[in-house]
Structures are given as C-alpha cells and as structure tokens.
Amino acid sequence: MSGYILSIDQGTSGTNAAIYDRELKFVSRGYSELDCAYPKSGWVEQDPEALWKSTLKAISSALENASVNPKDIISIGITNQRETTILWDTETSKPVYEAIVWQCRRSADICTELKNNNLEEEFHLKTGLLLDPYFSGTKIKWILDYNGLHQRARSRGIKFGTVDTWLIHKLTGGKQHVTDTTNASRTLLMNLETLQWDKDLCNHLNIPMEILPEIKPSAGIFGYTSGCDILPDGIPISGVIGDQQSALFGQGAFRFGEAKCTYGTGSFLMMNIGEKPSFNSHGILTTVGWSIGDKTVYALEGSAFVAGAAVQWLRDGLKLISTASEIESLALTVSDSGGVFFVPALTGLGAPYWKTDARGMFWGITRGTKQGHFARAVLEGIALQNLALLKLMEETAGEKISMLKVDGGAAANNVLMQFQSDILETPLFRPANLESTAFGAAAMSAIGVELCNGVDEIAKNIIEEKIFYPSMDKESVIHYTNFWEEMVKKV
C-alpha cells in the first residue's frame, strides 16, 4: 500500500522537510534557510511569517525532489526549535511581535527578579528547569510587558505558542491551538508531575492561562490540514515532539541510561531516565522525553548554546572558511590546537554554568598560531563544553553512559567526533542517517496513526555508520579538562 509520512523539522537556521515511506525508509528531503536578526547584544529574533514560509518552501522542495503527490501524504510529524516564543492575535492570526529565539538573553532581568523573590527552587522542582532567559516563560512575560498586551491576553485576544503550536495553527487554518508535553515542558509553566499548566507559576510571571495551548501526548491527533495551499485538507498531524527529544527518540534511546548528543546550532546532551523525573541542583535540566498514550518518559538534558553556530561565526564573521564543512580540512592542517583554547560563549554559557553574561574567548594565541589552530580550537571547545554535562548527568542518573549516540550536521565532522570521544573517554555511535531529529518526528507520527506498533519497529531502521573509540592518553585528558575549567572561570 502506498503512502508517505511528512516530517517537518523546523530549526533555528532553517527548515528541513523529510519524506518517509510507510516502513519509515527515507525518501527525500527539502531545505529552506531562515535568517535571525540581532537587534541588540544578546538579542535574537526571527520573523514568524518568514518561519512559516520557510516551512512551506521546504515541504514543496521535499515533495518535488521525490515526485510525491501531496495526496499520498498520510500523516505529518512536527519537530521544532523548542523555547522560541511566538504570540499572535486571535482574530487575525498576525504575530504581535517578532519570535524571540531560544538563544535570546533579553529577559535576564526578569529571571534575576524572580530569583531575588526566592522563586527559583519552586520553578525548578515543578518544571525541572532553571530561571534562565533560555526558556519561554520569561520571553512571554517580556513581550506582554513591552507591548502592553496583558489586557488583550486576559480577554483571549492573544495566543502563545512555541514553534510547533504556530505551525499547527497555520497548517490547520487556525483551527487548533495545541502543543505536546515535550514542548510544554520547556516553557517554565508546565508541572512535570501533572503534565498540565501550573497556575502558580503562571501567576508568578503574570501570564494569563487563557493564552496557553492545550497540552497533548507526543503521539496522537493534533488536528488536520486545512486551507494549506501545498497540501490537501484532512491530513492528520499525528506526532509532535521538541527537536532534542525527537533526536533522542530517533536515535533509539528507548532504555534507561541511553543518551545522545545533537550537534546543531547548539549542542544538546540528553539521557533517558525512565518514567520518574530526577532532579539535579547543579545546572542539569529535567524534561519530558516523550509521551505516548498514558506513558511518559523523562530525560536529563544539558544544553550548550553555541556549537555549529561557532563554525558559522568562523565562516560569516571571521571569514576563515567559506563553507561550514571546510573547518575539518582546515583543522587537519595542524596536528593539534597549538595550545589555543576557545570558549564558545558567544551568547552566554548554558548548562551547567548558566552564565548569562559570559562571552566567547580565545586563549593561548602566539606568533606561531595559524588558521588551523583556530579551527581546531573551535572544534575542541564545542566538545569540551559537553564534558561537564555528561559527568553530571551520569551522577544524577546513577548510571554511566556506555556509548553516546551522536547526530546533527556537525556530527559529520570526524575531527570533532574523535576529540569528543577522547575527552569523554566514551565510544560514540554515529548513525548512517544524521537526520535523527526528522526521523524521530516521522516515527512519532507513525505511532500516532497506528502505522507502527512500537519502538522495536523503529529501532530496526537505525543503522550504524561509524563508531569512534577514545584514543587519547589519560594525562592529556586531564590537561584538557583542567584547562577548560580554568578558561570557563575567565569568561
């Protein structure tokens, strides 16, 4: 029987649309870039309408590349950049402000005020998150405050959504205002135990609950396409999951203690911790991994704000390379980083440091420093910031990771992957398909329309491309580890 699953992977730097057949075999892909604006230092914005147009363009490209008739799409899965915050007018569906991207730090003062009011522990124990500008809640408050929208919000004139909610709203012709548990768990507003919006947390942020979408499990019917020019009406949107959770699911990390790292704009480590949340007071987050039916799997997460973005900066800012892939060949022009260290705190430092005001730094530059040393130092900096995250996750879960699964664009870089394995002293599993995020959403969609009976069917589609084994001597590992911690103190 024919039929295809459309997976929409909406990310910070662009939208990827992938088409899979009923057996979850990859068929085709389409991509459309998306710009960010940086109106002030630490501020990051996107145009919600441009985000939607990027999605339509990617879908059209994927359909065209495989000569797939849109009428043959039987379900849609959505995965997305998570904390990015969009508010729109209920009547017109027009955004009331630019989308505030997850990297944006403009709500730092709001976080500080909440901390000064001794509310951080309450937020952490209810949501598993920290009071940091990273998350949606303080971004929502900032938009409401800055634009004077509280009265309109209370009278249901405004709707809030993370990117999944915005895309569902557009795909269904404005008929649905919904999200899933994984995206809701990134807002600072959802209670991890009840999987519902928490009234007290909303009150602390002065956010009317009327603007919030309905929370649903990750697999199931979220709505049907309606009035979308490039897709026929009636296609079920049957899987929705945040991008990092989707990568965990798409990598087949279905058992307690299994973990993955996605190398995208940022770097995201995540570990499956089963059906009960565990909390860490040292900067590691607890979040929903996914929900299927009445079963919810939780995960630990550590996020570094800048990974692939540092390579983009080398390309666009410093002009050391003309394409992102060139960093590997440039790094291979030298045998090591020549004593140069790089802390990629270009938009602050994420877990476990949570230093909002931190800024990037090169250290150890001499007259002998070459372009290759800068390239290798950037790759090593991306890997080093994951070290503390992994160790804290292992400590919290009480489980040592035997192998780290990797995906995302930068996971194709062999220099980065080998150094990551070396510094973690852990083997790395790289799948043949690095688009684990898109695959995870497709798999969730298949479960949502009962094309797939469970995770065992999904696991058979995950094929090994290469395993990286640690080869660095212990003395060098200790040197890098200690020096990294000294560098972090300086930024």
Image (cartoon, grey):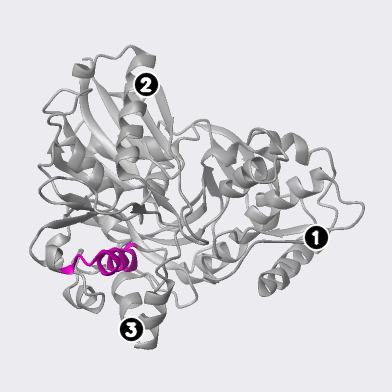
**In which image quadrant can residue 108 be found?**
bottom left
Where's the N terminus, which quadrant? top left
Residue matched to label 2? 61
Numbered disc 3: secondary structure: loop
Q: Nearer the viewer, mark 1 or mark 2?
A: 2
Q: Nearer the viewer, residue 490 or 104?
A: 104
**Inter-mark Cα distance, 1 to 2:** 47 Å
Residue sitting at x 32%, y 76%: 123
Q: Which residues are magenta?
A: 136-150
Residue 8, position as x, y percentages in the image: 32, 35
Q: Nearer the viewer, mark 3 or mark 1?
A: 3
Callout 1–callout 2 Cβ contact below 8 Å: no
Magenta region, main secondary structure: helix
Numbered disc 1: secondary structure: helix
Callout 2–callout 3 Cβ contact below 8 Å: no
Callout 3–callout 1 Cβ contact below 8 Å: no
**Inter-mark Cα distance, 3 to 1:** 42 Å
Residue sitting at x 51%, y 47%: 265
Residue matched to label 3? 119
Residue 412, position as x, y percentages in the image: 60, 36
Give the class, few, some or many, for how many residues have Cα within 10 Å of label 2's Cα (few <14, many ≥20): many
Q: Nearer the viewer, residue 298 or 351?
A: 351
Give the class, few, some or many, for how many residues have Cα within 10 Å of label 3's Cα (few <14, many ≥20): some
**Lateral position of residue 482 relative to residue 217, left or right:** right
> The disc labelled 2 sits on which kind of residue?
Ser
Q: Residue furthest left?
A: 155
Q: Nearer the viewer, residue 35 or 243?
A: 35
Residue matched to label 1? 476
